[in-house]
Image: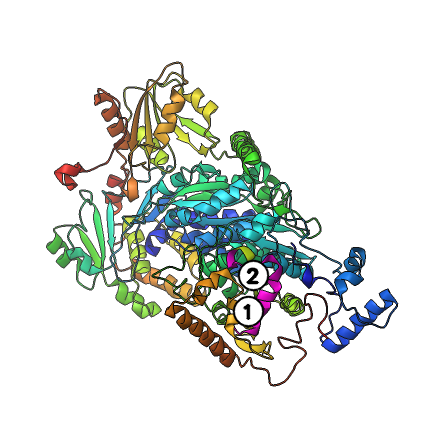
Amino acid sequence: MVAAYLLASAAFEVGRYCQAFPNFGAERRGAPVMAFVRIDAKPILRRSQVRTPAFLIIQDPGLLNVAGVLDGLREGGGILVNSPRSSEELSGETGKAVVSFAAAQMALQMTGKPLANVALLSAFASLTGLLPREALIKALSARFKGDVLEKNLKLVDMAADQVPTESWKDITHALSA
Amino acid sequence: MLSALEGSQALAQAVGLCRPGVVAAYPITPQTHIVENISKLVADGRLRCELVSVESEFSAASVALGAAASGVRAYTASSSQGILLMAEVLYNISGMRIPMVMTCANRAVGAPLNIWNDQQDSMAVRDSGWIQLYCADNQEAVDTTIQAFRIAERTEVPVMVCVDGFVLTHTLEPIDLPTQEQVDRFLPPYHFSRALDSRNPLSLGTCVDPSFFTEARHSQHQAVLRATTEIMAADRDYAGIIGRSGGGLLSVVGPAEADVAILALGSVCSTVQESMQLFPQDRPVKLIKLRAYRPFPMAALREVLQGVRDLVVLERAIAPGSGGIVGMEVRSLATTLTQLPRIHNYAVGLGGRDVPIEIYPRLVEAITRADEPAWFEIFDLEPEKLPVEDR
Amino acid sequence: MTTTDDTAVETSVDTTTDIAARKAALRNRLKDKRGSNEAPARAGTAFSIAELREHQPAFRGLEAGHRACQGCGEALGARLVAESAGPDVILTNATGCLEIFTSPWPQSAWRVPWIHSLFENSAAIAAGVEAAMKHLGKSTKVIAQGGDGGTFDIGFQALSGMLERMHNVLYVCYDNEAYMNTGVQRSGSTPHAAATTTSPAGLERMGKRHLKKDLLSIIAAHHIPYAASASVAYPVDLRRKVRRAMEVEGPTFLQVHCPCPLGWGHESSVTVEVARLAVQTGLFPLVEFERGEVAGVMPLRNPKPVTDYLKLQNRFRHLFSNDPRAREEREHLQALADHTIEKFNLRGEEADPLDSEGADTVRRGGLVA
C-alpha cells in the first residue's frame, strides 16, 4: 500500500494526475494484498478497480506462482519482481516479459529492513522513464525523515542501476492509451 | 494548496481547518484513518482541540452532543455498525437542534459481515433529522466538510457528510485544501444560542407531552426543509472565497435538454461521468449528481427532471421487501411532473462490488432493451452464484 | 417533595467538620432567634416558615414545585447535591424519574444549566461538556446524574469509559433500586429477594433471584480519586461528600441511596427512616474510596437486625409469610449485611459523633441531643 501511495505521489510531483488505492480489505502483515495506481495527464474520475494493468509490480516472488496474479495484464505489459532469481529464468517460467532483481535483499543491506517497495519503485521509474529520480525523492521526503530518508535515498540510487534504463519506455507509450 | 493526499488525510485536515473544539470518535473501518489523522494533528500541536477517544460510537456521538451544547464546535465520524449504534443519539442531536458535523465513511451493514462500501448505513438514518450530503470525490468531500459546519451552525440542524468508504477514504489523489485564512473568512467562530452556561442556566432536552410534540416535529421538519437555502448559500459563498463549488443541492453533467437522465449519489457519479466520456451513446444523456439527499431538494430535482423520458436511479442500498430507497422517493416526486418519466431503479455496488467503467453503456443497453422499466433490480447481481430457488 | 423532616433545622452554612462545634454554633443561632437559652424541643413548632427559610442554603439548584411523588428520596437527594455543588456547575441527566419530574416542558425546576439527552449516555454527555469546558478554559464543574438503571445497567459502559478517561466529572447515581420511571422493574441494583414487577414473589419465586450489583467496588476498581456511597438520611454526610468530590480535579462518583415510597411500598412519611435503617442494618454501607482503597466508613453504633428495615417495605412483605423459604431469605439478607459489616469493619467500638447514630442530626421533631 505504501508503494502505491509513493508511486502516485511521485507522479503527482511531476504534474501528473494520479490515483492510488488498496484492494480494499483488511491488511495484515504477511497476507497478500493488492494496491493499484493510475497515472494520467488528465483528471481521473473513475473509481472502478484496475482490471487490465499495464504494469505489475510484485513484491513477493512467491506470488508469481499464485493463480490469477498475472491475469489481466495487458498484452505486452511489463512485470517487475522482487526476486533473487534472474529475469530470464522467470520470463521463461511465466512466458511473459519479467524484470527481476533482489530488491528486498538490497533494502536489507541498505536500511536494515527487507522491505522491497522503495527499491522496486526506483527500478520501475528507471524502466519506464515515467518519473525522474527527483519525483521519487520528493515523495519519499514527504513520508520519511532523517536517517531513514537518507538510507532510502541511497537505496533509490542503487536500485535504479539494477534494471536496464528506459527499456520499458515503448511499452509505456504503447499502453498509455 | 494542491497536494496528493489520501482521502481520510485530506478530510482530517479539512476538519482541522474548521478549528473544532472537541472531536470524539471510536475506531471502525473504513472511518479510522480520519480520526487517526486528526489525532496526529493534535499530537503534533497543529490542532488545538480536545480529542476524546471514547469507548463506543454511542459515546462518540454523545460526547460531541455534550460539547456542541456547551458552545464548542464538535465533530465525530463513523461507519456502518457504528452509525447504527449511534442511531439513537443521532435522532437526539437533531431533535435538540444541536449543530454539529459528522463524516459517515459509507460502508455496508452486516450481516453478512462486510467492511466494504455501500450506502446502507447512512440510508438507515436518513430520517434521523440530519442533513445528508453525498460526495462524488475527495475534493467534494473536503469542500463539503468545511461547508457543513456553516450549514449546521446557521440552521441548527446537524450535518452528515457521506463519503464512500475505501473508494474515497482510502484513495490517494490530488486534492486542494483551502488555506486557514480562507476557511476563517468563510466560517465564523462557533456560536450556539442555547449553550450550557452557568451564568445563564437553561434546561435542554426536556420532556414534551402530546400538547406540543407535534409542533416540535413540525418546526424540525421545516428547519431541515429550509436548509436547502443555506446549503446553496454556503456553496455560493464558499465558491466566492475558495473559487470552487462543492456541488450545490445537485449538479448536472451533460446536455440539460437530454431526455435520458441517470441520477446517483456519491462516488459512483465519478465513474459514470468518465464512462459517459469514454463510451458516448447515440441518445443524449445527462447525469444528475444528487448531493443533498436530506433535505430532499424537491424543487431543484423537479427542474432537472422536467422533460426527461427515461430516468435511471442508481443507488447503493436496498430496502428489503420494498426495493430502492432513493428510487422510491424520486418516483414519488416524479408524479408531480407534467410528464412522468419511465423510472429504472437499480442498486449497484452493494458491499463493495466494483462498479466497472463500462457501467454507462450497460445501463443504456438495459433501459433500451427493457419493455417495462425495472421497478427495482440489483443491476450487478450474478444469479448463477445462487441456488435456483433464490434467483 | 414532602419529606420536610430533614429540613427543619438543617443548615449548610457551616463547613466545619467538628460536629460538636457545629451543633453549638447552630444552637447559638437558634437561641439568638428565640431569645432563650433553651434548645428547641420541636423545631417545627418553634419557627415560622420564613425563619426556617433563612436557615436554608443560600443556593438552591433544584427548586421546589417539581412533580416528584410525596416522600421521593431521589428528589431529596438531587436537591442536596445541587445545593451543595452549585451554582457554577453544569448538570447532565439520564432519562428517568428525576428527568421527568423536573422538566415537563415548558417548565423546569433547575436553576443550574441542565441537559438531558438519553437513558444510557449521561456520563458521555458529561464527558463532552467537560471537554468543552476544558477547551473554553472554564472552571465550571460538570455533574452527571442518573438513576440506578441508567448507572448500573444501561449506562454502565459510558460511565466506565468516562471514569477511565479521567474526565473532571462528578457522577451521582440516585439509587432507588429499580426502574421506577417505567413502573418498578428490577435492575442490577435491586436487592436480593426484593419484589418488583419483573421479579414478583410467587409460588416459584421469592422476589429477585440475584444479588444487588456491588457497583461501588467496580467504580473503585477504576482507581479514580474519590468514590463514595451516601444516603438521604444523612444529609450532612451527603453534602460533605459532594463538596469533597467537587474539590477533586478528576472523576468522582457518588452513590446516593434514595428510597422510593411507591416502588418500595412504604409510607411517604418514612422515607428518611427507611433510608436510615438501610444504613444502620449494614445493608447499605456508607463508604469512601480514594484511588481504589477504602478511605473511610460511617461506623454503625448498634447494628440493627435487617428485619427492622425489611418489615417497613411491601417489596419484602413475602419474606414475612409462613413460607419456610421466607425465613431462609431473611437469614440470607442478614448474612449479607453481616458480611458487609465485617468486610468494611463497620462496627463502631464506642459512641462516635460521626457514626450512624451521631451523624444523624435530623430526626422527626428536631436535633439529636
Q: Is residue B237 above or below residue B99?
A: above
Q: Quadrant of residue A120?
A: bottom left
User: Residue reaching furthest right?
Assistant: C35
Residue A56 is labelled as: none
How would you classify the magenta stretch by its main secondary structure?
Answer: helix
Type of the residue with mark 2: Pro
Q: Where does label 2 land, which residue?
A: C259
Neighbor class of circle 2 (other Cα within 10 Å; few <14, some 14-19, many 20+) is many
Same chain for labels 2 and 1? Say yes or no: yes
Q: Give, as a single range, the part of the protein colored magenta.
A: C263-284
User: Residue reaching furthest top?
Assistant: B338
Q: Are marks 2 and 1 in contact (CB under 8 Å)?
A: yes
Q: Is residue A79 above or below residue C168?
A: above
**The C terminus of chain B is located in which quarter?**
top left
Neighbor class of circle 1 (other Cα within 10 Å; few <14, some 14-19, many 20+) is many
Is C272 magenta? The answer is yes
Quick check: can you spot residue C343? yes
Ranked by sequence position, the earlier of labels 2 and 1 is: 2
Out of B79 and B92, give the one closest to the viewer. Answer: B92
**Circle 2 — which element?**
loop
Out of C299 and B254, give the one closest to the viewer. Answer: C299
Q: Where does label 1 land, which residue?
A: C278
Residue B167 drawn at (x, y percent): 35, 44
Task: For mark 1, name the chain.
Answer: C
Type of the residue with mark 1: Ala
